[in-house]
Image (cartoon, helix red, strand yellow):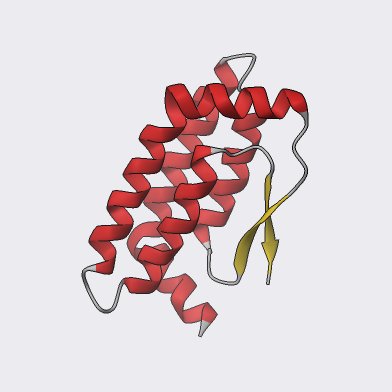
């Protein structure tokens, strides 16, 4: 079932989400302070291609990562998170796309504070 869901995801929303996450990663690499965030968004772009069967796991956050997370959340993270939440809500309005909306909700929490989270296969 995961394989079918991943194929359907990739054909409908996955390629677009992965492309947008790749653009965010490249923009983060332009700055010096957000390079770690860029690496996290590269991982998110990979996750966005086949999200079913993967989950986010919290890891220990250091002081520098906490500062970068707060700066990211204030300037960029909340806007990206609201976009993912809105898309997830729209997808949950239909019966067939509810699992896709739930995936967008998981990603929304990741985009607010990207450092201190890793993708793990379940």
Please tell me whether residue 50 is drawn above or below residue 94 in the rendered image: above
Residue drawn at x 41%, y 65% is 102
User: Can residue 35 be seen by looking at this rendering?
Assistant: no
- Between 27 and 100, the one lying in front of the other is 100
> Image check: 26 left or right of 115?
left
> Which x, y percent locates residue 34?
60, 22
Residue drawn at x 23%, y 59% is 90
- Between 103 and 28, the one lying in front of the other is 103
- Between 102 and 13, the one lying in front of the other is 102
> Image check: 36 left or right of 19?
right
* Residue at the extreme bottom of the image, as rendered: 1
> Which x, y percent locates residue 106?
49, 57
Residue drawn at x 44%, y 22% is 75
Q: Quadrant of the C terminus?
A: bottom right
> Which x, y percent locates residue 108?
45, 48
User: Can residue 43 be seen by looking at this rendering?
Assistant: yes
Q: How many marks?
A: 0
Please tell me whether residue 97 is drawn above or below residue 44 in the rendered image: below
- Between 6 and 112, the one lying in front of the other is 112
Residue drawn at x 37%, y 48% is 84
Q: Quadrant of residue 66?
A: top right
Please tell me whether residue 41 is drawn above or below residue 48 in the rendered image: above
């Amino acid at each position: 079932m995961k394989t079918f869901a991943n194929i359907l995801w990739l054909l409908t929303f996955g390629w677009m989400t992965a492309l947008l996450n790749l653009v965010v990663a490249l923009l983060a690499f332009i700055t010096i302070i957000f390079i770690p965030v860029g690496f996290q968004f590269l991982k998110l772009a990979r996750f966005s291609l086949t999200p079913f069967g993967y989950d986010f796991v919290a890891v220990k956050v250091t002081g520098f990562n906490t500062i970068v997370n707060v700066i990211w959340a204030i300037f960029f993270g909340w806007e990206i998170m609201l976009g993912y939440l809105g898309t997830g809500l729209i997808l949950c309005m239909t019966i067939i796309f509810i699992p896709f909306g739930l995936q967008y909700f998981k990603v929304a929490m990741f985009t607010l504070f990207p450092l201190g989270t890793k993708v793990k296969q379940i």
